[in-house]
Image: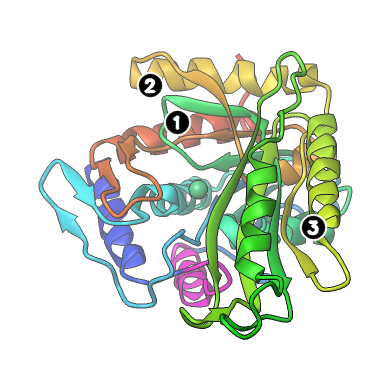
Amino acid sequence: MKEKYKEMLDTLRELCAIPAPSHMEYKRAKYCKNWLEKAGAKGVYIDEAINVIFPLNCEGSNDITVFAAHTDVVFPDTESMPYIDDGEKIHCPGVGDDTASVVVLMMLAKYFIENKMVPPKGILFVCNSCEEGLGNLKGTRQIFKDFDGRIKQFISFDCSYNKISDRCVGSHRYEVEVLTEGGHSFQKFGNANAIHVLSEIISEIYKVQIPQKAGSITTYNVGSIVGGTSINTIAQSAKMLCEYRSTDKECLEMMCRKFEEIFENARSEKVQVLVEKIGDRPCSNIDDKKLDRLKNICKPIIERIIHEPVAFESASTDCNIPLSLGIPAICIGVYQGDGEHTREEWIEKASLALGLEIAIKIARLLGEVEDEK
Ligand SMILES: [Zn+2]
């Protein structure tokens, strides 16, 4: 295990040094493909969505289990980001979410290769692309397109190991642009101002009463605005990014109708409101009971290894895609850390060894290379 621990840390340091904003994961994907091939993996390929795929005994199988971790990070940086190993922790943006998980996933694949384990129904190991933000789950969508109907369960490694997300949060994201005639601030005073119209739209959004369906959580947000030309110009254009999310499909649809109404009401002969949907993450479309088996297997294994209780939560992850298709999926953690999506993110170094233990135990059970206990 000592050797493995060192190998994990070396791999983590090398992967962290490769920038990987969503849609720009190619260098990381190539690194992962080479790494897996060096570990003895056969048949590894990079698909058109920049997923790295290692199918193990999947040929002819219609009962495939997927283990996935995403290669992209939320940061737009295209240069390496600072990587600090203080002996106990590693500090680097994206180190936990989800780079450490990718390392554990590859180590898991290597464990299967080294031990010549042949999962009878096939396992797909995937370092997937585009999980974050406007990546819009492109990588996972591609997997379910290419393996249409053949995947029967999906496990994503993506978060600290004291959490499991078993419920997915759906969302719609928009770029909204208001266009008006504008003009000179003095000579054309009274002409519609795009900034003013957009502000009114935002005020209306913040008056929306969120749906009160029992057990559901719904939220909305305006995340950024830009617009205008100069201090003495009636703004001709103003833009914003906004979103709403919900754990419930019906609530998501209700929010959709409310937002569309607000956009429509702002339109007039002199005001254009252009709405582009830039993100669409589906809600779950599966009976919760169908997730019990995965939950009942994963939770006790993780708790036994980390000696802490594990909590269930809702999140927006790669699991949204299988869950929306009615396929059991769960998102578990294989490291301990904090500060995801901030530049202060860190992980506990020692947690990687526990993470690998979790991954191996769960993969052996779900891959049916040992009996369920
Ligand atoms: Zn993530």
Does the Cβ of the disc 3 residue fall within 8 Å of ligand 1? no
Could you tell whether 179 is left or right of 87 in the image? Answer: right
Mark nearer the viewer, 1 or 3: 3
Residue range corresponding to the magenta coloring = 21-39
Identify the residue position indicated by label 1 in the image. Answer: 358
Question: What amino acid is found at the position of numbered circle 2 in the picture?
Answer: Ile
Residue appearing at x 71%, y 22% in the figure = 216
Residue appearing at x 57%, y 80% in the figure = 185
| Residue sitting at the far left | 87
Question: Measured from the top left, where is residue 130 in percent x and y?
Answer: 60, 61
Could you tell whether 157 is left or right of 138 in the image? Answer: left
Identify the residue position indicated by label 3 in the image. Answer: 266
Question: What amino acid is found at the position of numbered circle 3 in the picture?
Answer: Ala
Identify the residue position indicated by label 2 in the image. Answer: 305
Residue 367, compared with residue 318, is above or below; it is above
Mark nearer the viewer, 2 or 3: 3
* Contact flag, marks 1 and 2 (Cβ < 8 Å): yes
Q: Main secondary structure of the magenta part?
A: helix
Question: Measured from the top left, where is residue 307 in percent x and y?
Answer: 34, 15
Check if residue 356 falls in the magenta segment: no
3D distance between C-alphas at marks 2 and 3: 55 Å
